[in-house]
Image (cartoon, rainbow, N blue to C red):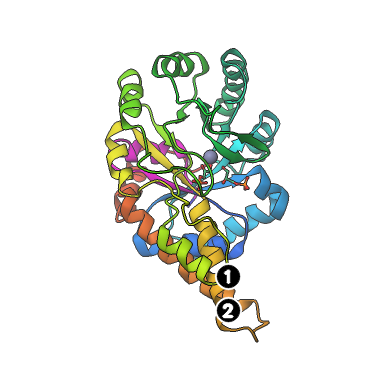
């Protein structure tokens, strides 16, 4: 069942985080639903502009609708990841999305406020909620690359002013992580002190953590043992940190790179071990199973595992209209 992002946030805030995963194809989608059913967890499906270009807008919509039918117990929202203004409007008008992210974080503050405000007005008129971003994560997202020197943590006072002026429903905050496989070196990690300061100024307001893949060392080692060439110093967010971030208002946790690593490991190992195979369904099946196991594991770390029944009951009690 596709529900509003707002309804999921209302149940989750301060108690658990919703995993938000990017999808691009059928195998990933099947693994995503299968894993969440195993964990009995609610979740958010994210679609990037890159995914819309790759698979096609309608193809993604129909894959998700088919999965919704195949897994009638699943409770999830559909969200545009890192949208520009026009893509936000396209998604708002499409009637398919639960929420959009307008990412104008690379613009000067006033311009970010103005763009976000325009998107919020259009989205709220149609019942969708809006995630905005303030501060700059390092790494690559869509066509924009932010080098580590220019990455900038979210300023807590600016965050409060930004939310007040834009009316956005959740805020992606830059708190140390970055997109991709190379987030930290040495003992670097999430700046919890900064999240706590933001929360003090925005109590009860959902915060979003982008760049939350863990890039497990064992996964990198397996990929490299099967012919990959990832830098073995690749390092991500400690998945045990999700539980520390939840009481600080982090309600949505974006994960994409880790899923790509599962894809890479499964395929490299498969073709290393079965060089004669030319049936794509064999690695495809292995990917769906491995992806489901990965999702179930993450749901435990996010504390969203086992929440499905309580989320369903809360949705029935509230008047949260399915999106
Ligand atoms: O932050 C971006 C996500 O990892 C999506 O990546 O734009 O290559 O689909 P993508
Ligand atoms: P990762 O690159 O850490 O998976 O982050 C994904 C993300 O933030 C998508 O918006
Ligand atoms: Zn992101």
Q: Say which of marks 1 and 2 sits in front.
A: 1
Query: Which residue is at 38% across, 55% downward?
Result: 298
Q: Nearer the viewer, residue 256 or 140?
A: 140
Of mark 1 and mark 2, the one earlier in the sequence is 1
Check disc 2 and report its element: helix, strand or loop. Answer: helix
Residue at numbered disc 2: 272
Q: Are marks 1 and 2 in contact (CB under 8 Å)?
A: yes
Q: Is residue 183 magenta?
A: no
Tell me if 257 is positioned left or right of 192 in this view: right
Q: CA distance from mark 1 to mark 2?
A: 8 Å
Q: Is residue 8 visible?
A: yes
Query: Which residue is at 45% across, 13% downward?
Result: 161
Position above or below: 55 against 267: above
Residue at numbered disc 1: 227
Query: Which residue is at 37% across, 65% downward?
Result: 38
Q: Is residue 9 magenta?
A: yes
| Whole-percent x, y for residue 178 in the image | 50, 39
Check disc 1 and report its element: helix, strand or loop. Answer: loop
| Whole-percent x, y for residue 243 in the image | 28, 44
Instruction: Count every numbered label the image shows and give the total.
Output: 2
Position above or below: 210 against 227: above
Q: Nearer the viewer, residue 163 or 189?
A: 189
Q: Is residue 34 visible?
A: no
Position above or below: 201 against 238: above
Q: Give the quarter of the image for residue 317.
A: top left
């Amino acid at each position: 069942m596709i529900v509003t992002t707002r309804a999921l946030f209302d149940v989750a805030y301060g108690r658990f985080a919703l995993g938000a995963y990017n999808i691009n194809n059928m195998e990933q989608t099947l693994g995503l639903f299968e894993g969440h059913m195993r964990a009995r967890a609610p979740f958010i499906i994210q679609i990037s502009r890159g995914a819309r270009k790759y698979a096609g807008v309608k193809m993604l919509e129909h894959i998700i609708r088919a999965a919704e039918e195949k897994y009638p117990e699943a409770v999830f929202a559909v969200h545009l990841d890192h949208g520009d203004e026009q893509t936000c409007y396209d998604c708002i008008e499409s009637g398919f999305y639960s929420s959009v992210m307008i990412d104008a974080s690379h613009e000067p503050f006033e311009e970010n406020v103005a763009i976000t405000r325009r998107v919020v007005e259009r989205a709220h008129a149609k019942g969708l909620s809006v995630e905005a971003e303030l501060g700059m994560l390092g790494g690559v997202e869509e066509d924009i690359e932010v080098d580590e020197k220019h990455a900038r943590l979210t300023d807590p006072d600016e965050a409060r002013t930004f939310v007040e002026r834009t009316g956005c429903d959740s805020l992606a905050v830059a708190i140390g992580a970055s997109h991709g496989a190379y987030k930290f070196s040495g003992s670097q990690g999430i700046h919890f002190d900064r999240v706590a300061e933001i929360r003090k100024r925005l109590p009860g307001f959902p915060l979003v953590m982008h760049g939350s893949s863990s890039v497990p060392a064992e996964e990198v080692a397996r990929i490299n043992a099967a012919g990959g060439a990832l830098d073995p110093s690749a390092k991500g967010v400690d998945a045990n940190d999700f539980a520390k971030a939840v009481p600080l208002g982090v309600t949505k946790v974006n994960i994409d790179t880790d899923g790509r690593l599962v894809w890479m490991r499964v395929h490299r190992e498969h073709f290393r071990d079965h060089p004669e195979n030319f049936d794509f369904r064999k690695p495809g099946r292995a990917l769906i199973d491995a992806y489901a196991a990965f999702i179930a594991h993450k749901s435990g770390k996010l504390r969203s595992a086992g929440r499905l029944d309580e989320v369903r009951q809360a949705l029935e009690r509230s008047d949260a209209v399915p999106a």
